[in-house]
Structures are given as structure tokens and as C-alpha cells.
Amino acid sequence: MLKPIPTLFLIALVFVVLRLPVTYRQEGGEDEEFYAVPGWTVATEGVPRVPYVPARDHRSWFYRVDTALFAMPPAYFYWQAPFYRLLPAGYGTARLASAVAGLVAVWLVFELGRQVLGDETVGLWAAALYSLSRTFFFPAVRARPDMLCGMLGLAALLAVGSWQATGRWRRLALAGALLGLGLLTHPFAFAYCLQIAGWVAISASGVKRRLTDLAVLTGSALATFALWTPLIVRWPELFREQFVKNVIDQAGPGLLTRMLLPWESLVYHYHLLLEYAQPLQLGLMATGLVAATWLAVANRRRQARLLVALAWSAVYLLVTVQGPHGAKGYWCYPAALVWLCVAFAVVNLGRWLSAEARRPRLRSIALGGVLAAAMLPGLGLRTWWTHARHWNDVDYNAPRFARELLGDLPPDARLVLDEAFVFDAYLAGRNVALACNNPFYYESAERPYDYLVITRLGRQKGIAASMNGRLLREYGDPHDLFACYAQVYVPAKKPP
């Protein structure tokens, strides 16, 4: 029999040992240049901004983002700020904020299994499977708001479940506040806002009670979302330039169409998940969801039917609300509910094997082996082992690598760097701007510079060519994807 506290502690320990050391040693990844620094400016200045993106093109979603950031809601940056006050600034500390949100999400998955299904064993299995999955791994170790937003959605589900069990409106108001915080973290929270509003609506008996419950939920959500108002009032023109272009205009008018005809979005997200979760884990998730649905219907268990309804609706709403959108971390929310369904099916299968099957221990071991094999692609063992073998090698320690690289460049030089080391250069007090050739973000092509630093990401985007750079020197190993690598360019002489 699994015991909750030791098992949850073991799950957290595996995460801390396998994930956290590596997150502090890796260079910045795509989008982290935008999501890591605003928490630092909140901690030091009180305002979220991206100081090394001096965008002045009105077509850009990040117009004057070096003054204040409104392209995305700010809750994630305020969540990051205490970590920056306590720990050295850098990509690793920004990622730690996501990791802590991830650990809270794992505990919430356990609580949902315990409270919704009334089964601690299912909750523990779900927490373990979720924490080892690829759908958890990537958002929990990147400086992005996806995991915090997903965690707030899971907490809101738990609050609504508690309200349904106790009838206390304070729990419903808490759920609304969590929805408001979710919307303040990332727009994909709209998916679970719709889901929870639907749950509240069908839970009440009578039109008057239903309207009252929805008013409490909506009112507390809007009141919480209004915490953004002081910043918006201070820079209303930047809010219009950034948030409206990046979020409102991008949402477009197609939501109702996608809800009625979701096939294009479903196909898109199937291929996205196939790459993201990989065939083994995606197959396990799909099989477990279907099996849990069959068990819930066949056994007529109200709590199990609620769980599968939440899982199916979370998948459907994320697919239709987001549409064909390339970001994958959003799946941390519906995946948590799907892994709960997988755990429900696995625990029921295990109990049947123990009670009915011949050689139950052998078959239970075989079942455990299948689960372990499916989880191996998400453990990050190869990355962990590579860093362990090269622990003292500067090429595998991004902060040290950045310090040595910057130490070779004159302190007063005008630097342009891509996402891998731009935050490190800014924290070092250098005169720095982001290397970027996306007109919707920022174009650095016309910016004067003394040195241009490009890593693998910048090479893929052709930034050196767009900035007329001449290769000066290289750092690191270009052939080992686990090692840091950078090229330093100087401006090429223009032909006469």
C-alpha cells in the first residue's frame, strides 16, 4: 500500500535530482529571452519589461517593451520576482519558478485523485506518471508561464470540487480568484475558465441558483484580473499596442467555428503531441483515457464519470481555444487530467490482476515494466548523465560559458546577442540588444554593433547574414548538442 507523504516526497526528490541541476546549467532557449527578464525587472524596479528589446516599429507586438511589457499578462513575472530576490539572477532562477509551480501541480494531481475519486492510490500513481511525463517535463524546466497557468487551473478544479462537496460560497469565490490569476498568467487559461464555468452551471439546481453561482465565480475572476489595472492605467497606449496585437487580434473570430468544427485543430494538435509526448507516452495517454472512460460508464461511478468528463473537456477546449498554435507547454493542464485517467485505469487493472489473474505478481511486474518503458523518454536521463560526466567542463555550464565569452569582449562594446546569452549579458551590465529577425517581435538588422554573438538558435534563423556579420571566432563544441556553442561576428566591411 502506497503511503502519501513518503511517495510524494520521493516523486519530488526524483524531480529535484534529475531536473534542477541541469536547468541551472543550460543556455537560454527559445522565448526565454522574453519570459526570464521581466521577473528580474519586477524584483528590482517594480515593472515588468524587456530592457534589451528596443522595438520602435508600430507593427511589432513588442513595441516599446523596454518601457513596460503588456504583450502577455504579468502574473508569471510577479511569481518569478521573489525567486530573484532570494537567488542569483539568471535563466536557472527563472526556470526554478516554473519548477516550483510544477511541484505544486504534481501535488494537486494527487489531491484531485484523492478528492474527486476518493482514491489515494490513484492520486499517487497519477502524480508519479505526470511528474515523469514529457508533458510535464518541458514546461516545468523552462522560463515560460505555461506550468504556472496549468497549476492554477488544477487548483481551481480542486476548489470547485470542494465547493460542490461543501456548498460553501467561499470555495467558489476562491475558484474564481484562481481563474482570474490564470488569465493574468496566460490566455490559454480561457480554456479551463470555460470548462469550470460549465461545471458550475450544471451543478446547480434552478435558474436563480445557477445564475448566482456563476455570478460569484465570474465576479471574483474579474476582480482578480483587475489587479492588472494600475499598470494598464499608467501606460494605456502600450497596452493597446502590445496586448491587443499579440492576444486579442491573434485570437481572431474563429473560436465558435473551431468549437463546432474542431477537426483541423484536432489534426494539428495530434501531430504536435506526437512530436511532443512521443508515440509511447501519447499511446499510453490515449489508451488510458479510453479505458478510464469505459470503466466509468460500465461501473456507473459518478466520480469516475466526472473525472473523464473533465479530461475530455480539457482536451477539447484547449484544442479549440488555441487552434493551430505551435506552443506545446499548454498541454501541461489537460495532460494532468489525462494522466489521472491513466492512473485510474492502471490501478483498476492492477487490482483485477491481484484478484483474478493467474500469477498476479508476474503480470503486475510486466505492467510496471510497460509503464516504466513508456516513461523513460521523459526522464531526461541522457541529458543528466552528459552533464554529470562533464560537470567541471565550462562548455556544459552555460553561466560560466557566458562569463568567459563576455570576458573576451571589451566592456564598453555594443553587443547584439541571440536568446541563449542575451540575459546573461544584460545581467553583466553590458550594452546589449537582442539579435532577432522577426518583424512581429523585433528586428535588429539595422542596429549598429561592435560584436554579434550567435548560437545554434541564431544560426538556424540566419541572423548573422541579416546583420552583415563576419565571423571572428567560435566557442564550444558545434557537434555536441548538449554543449554550449557560440560564434562571435564583427560587422563586415560594406563594398565600395
Image (cartoon, helix red, strand yellow):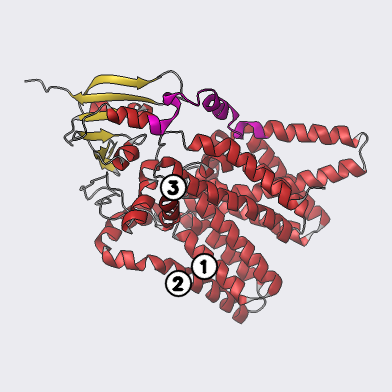
Q: Residue 293, image x and y in percent? A: 73, 50
Q: Residue 491, image x and y in percent? A: 17, 26
Q: Residue 161, image x and y in percent? A: 66, 65
Which residue has dot 1 on it?
177
Which residue has dot 2 on it?
223
Please rate how many residues cluster around mark 2, counting C-alpha atoms within 10 Å: few if below 14, some from 14 to 19, many from 20. some
Please rate how many residues cluster around mark 1, counting C-alpha atoms within 10 Å: few if below 14, some from 14 to 19, many from 20. many
Please tell me which of labels 3 and 2 falls first in the chain. 3
Calculate the distance from the C-alpha at mark 3 to the C-alpha at mark 2.
32 Å
Depth check, mark 3 against mark 2: the one in front is: 3
* Residue 336 horizontal side relative to residue 425, left or right: right
Residue for point 21% across, 34% down: 411
SS type, badge 3: loop
Name the one closer to the observer, 252 or 282: 282
Residue type indicated by callout 3: Leu
Does the residue at mark 1 contact the one at mark 3 (Cβ under 8 Å)? Answer: no
Please rate how many residues cluster around mark 3, counting C-alpha atoms within 10 Å: few if below 14, some from 14 to 19, many from 20. few
Which residue has dot 3 on it?
87
What secondary structure do most residues of the magenta stretch adopt? helix
Residue 256 image label: none
Residue type indicated by callout 2: Ala
Residue numbers of the magenta segment: 375-400
